[in-house]
Amino acid sequence: MSARFGRLPWLWLSLLVFVIDQASKFWFDNNLTMYQQIVVIPEYFSWTLAYNTGAAFSFLAGASGWQRWFFAAIAVVVSVVLVVWLKRLKPDETWLAMALALVLGGALGNLVDRVVFGHVVDFILVHWQHRWYFPAFNVADAAISLGAILLALDMFKSNKSGETTP
């Protein structure tokens, strides 16, 4: 693939994340009732259906509805920026391309939920002996988080072009 396309071939990963995310949300939304739990690992991990009208950790979930379009607009802008960034990457920037593709796939997965349903479908629940619960999340959220971790790790790589190691 020529340098003209940068790292756009990594869009396959975005598509994979998007398809898995949407398929899993469809399945859980059609097979569980709201807040129904299916215990996978007792005391630690369950499947449960929840809707989030806000952003991460239900931020602004209680707002009057404007947040749906606000977060959708942010997802569109971020997605465009990520595609342009992928196109401009150099051939040796594989980790960065993977990170951007993961974030893009997750952003698009949650964008579709917001626009079509007005909320994001969550179904993964991690907890500790019913005393501590991490907010429910989905495949898109996991991809965005993994992509963010890879972005952070990429920032600390010392073999970037033009840099010298101390």
Image (tube, rainbow, N blue to C red):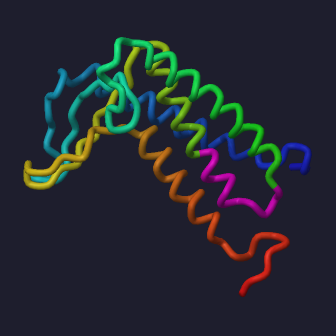
In-image side of 85 versus 71 (left or right): right
In the displayed structure, would residue 124 be above or below residue 159?
A: above
Q: Picture coordinates of residue 157 (x, y %)?
A: 66, 72
The residue that appears at 91% across and 49% down in the rendered structure is 2
- Between 111 and 64, the residue placed more toward the observer is 64
The tally of labels here is: 0
In-image side of 48 versus 71 (left or right): left
The residue that appears at 63% across and 45% down in the rendered structure is 101
Magenta stretch: includes residue 74 = no
- Between 129 and 60, the residue placed more toward the observer is 60
Magenta stretch: includes residue 93 = yes
In the displayed structure, would residue 145 be above or below residue 47?
A: below
In-image side of 121 versus 47 (left or right): right
The residue that appears at 51% across and 32% down in the rendered structure is 19
**What is the quadrant of residue 15 in the picture?**
top right
Question: Which residue appears farthest toward the bottom when viewing the image?
Answer: 166
The boundaries of the magenta stretch are: 90-101
**What is the quadrant of residue 139 in the picture?**
top left
Quadrant of image for the C terminus: bottom right
- Between 37 and 81, the residue placed more toward the observer is 81
Q: Picture coordinates of residue 132 (x, y %)?
A: 14, 51
Q: Picture coordinates of residue 81 (x, y %)?
A: 71, 36
User: Please, what is the dominant secondary structure of the magenta stretch?
Assistant: helix
Q: Picture coordinates of residue 146 (x, y %)?
A: 48, 53
The residue that appears at 57% across and 28% down in the rendered structure is 74
